[in-house]
Image (spheres, grey):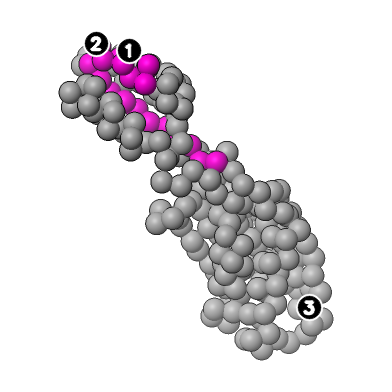
């Protein structure tokens, strides 16, 4: 499982003049789909008098679990949101949303719009900068009371961090954080040392 990912270094806004039209391009680092949707709504509220004020694209997460979405917001189909998404994927970044507000000043054909919106996406990513971050998983490990020490010792010796310990009627659940690449081997070790009595659940995915 992938530990590291790339995203924009900071939230950023650029203004571009392309063929007499002004494009205001806003980008933000987000962790969830709701975070992306909230940012899109805030930008749209900033420019209530502009017809095309919420063309957007975003990508959240990694690999097969990633979520991508793009909207043309009234522009010809495929001419606005998809070029932004292509810019995001071309930069190999995630956890990012880009919103474009276009002020009319001249006419664009579909090909011109595709080029313009693609340029908007690439330019705001360039100006925001790209950095590498790490992904962490929070998991719960349920074991009998007499196995708790073995779980804690393994976590402390193998790159895990203990967040909490919860006692239940059936035993104890250790809440721990680790990088995704450590998870499968950790499960195998704990399953073996507990005689198959351990239960695992993923509680949270965090991007740092």
Question: Mark 1 and 2 residues: CB-CB less than 8 Å, in contact?
Answer: yes
Is 114 placed left or right of 1 in the picture?
right
Real-space Cα separation, disc 3 to disc 2, in angstroms: 68 Å
Crowd around label 1: few <14 · some 14–19 · many ≥20 (10 Å): few
Tell which of 117 and 74 is nearer to you.
Answer: 117
Image position of 193 with respect to 208: above or below: above
Q: Quadrant of residue 77?
A: bottom right
Q: Position of residue 44 (x, y in %)?
A: 66, 60
Crowd around label 2: few <14 · some 14–19 · many ≥20 (10 Å): few
Image position of 137 with respect to 44: above or below: above
Q: Residue at x 53, y 58 (%)?
A: 59
Q: Which residue is mark 2?
A: 146
Q: Which residue is mark 1?
A: 149
Q: Residue at x 46, y 27 (%)?
A: 159
Q: Position of residue 123 (x, y in %)?
A: 73, 66
Q: Position of residue 141 (x, y in %)?
A: 31, 25
Crowd around label 3: few <14 · some 14–19 · many ≥20 (10 Å): some
Pick whichever of labels 3 and 1 is earlier in the sequence: 3
Real-space Cα separation, disc 3 to disc 1, in angstroms: 64 Å
Disc number placed over residue 41 in the picture, else none: none
Is 130 placed left or right of 81 in the picture?
right
Label 3 sits on a secondary structure element that is: strand
Real-space Cα separation, disc 1 to disc 2, in angstroms: 7 Å
Q: Quadrant of residue 144?
A: top left
Q: Position of residue 125 (x, y in %)?
A: 69, 60
Label 2 sits on a secondary structure element that is: helix
Q: Is residue 138 magenta?
A: yes
Q: Is residue 72 magenta?
A: no
Q: Is residue 5 visible?
A: yes
Of circles 3 and 1, the one toward us is 1
Looking at the rendering, the stretch of residues picked out in magenta corresponds to 134-154
């Amino acid at each position: 499982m992938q530990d590291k990912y790339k995203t924009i270094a900071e939230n950023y806004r650029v203004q571009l003049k392309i063929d007499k039209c002004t494009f205001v391009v806003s980008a933000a680092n987000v962790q969830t789909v709701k975070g992306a949707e909230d940012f899109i709504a805030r930008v749209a509220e900033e420019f209530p008098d502009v017809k095309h004020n919420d063309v957007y694209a975003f990508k959240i997460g990694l690999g097969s679990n990633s979520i991508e979405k793009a909207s043309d917001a009234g522009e010809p189909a495929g001419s606005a949101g998809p070029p932004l998404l292509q810019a995001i994927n071309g930069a190999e970044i995630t956890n990012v949303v880009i919103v474009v507000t276009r002020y009319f000043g001249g006419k664009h054909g579909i090909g011109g719009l595709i080029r313009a919106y693609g340029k908007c996406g690439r330019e705001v990513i360039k100006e925001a900068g790209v950095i590498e971050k790490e992904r962490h998983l929070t998991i719960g490990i349920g074991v009998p009371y007499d196995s708790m020490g073995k779980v804690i010792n393994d976590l402390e010796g193998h790159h895990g961090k203990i967040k909490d310990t919860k006692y239940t009627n059936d035993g104890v659940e250790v809440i721990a954080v680790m990088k995704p690449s450590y998870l499968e081997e950790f499960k195998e070790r704990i399953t073996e040392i507990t005689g198959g009595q351990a239960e695992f659940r993923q509680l949270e995915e965090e991007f740092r």
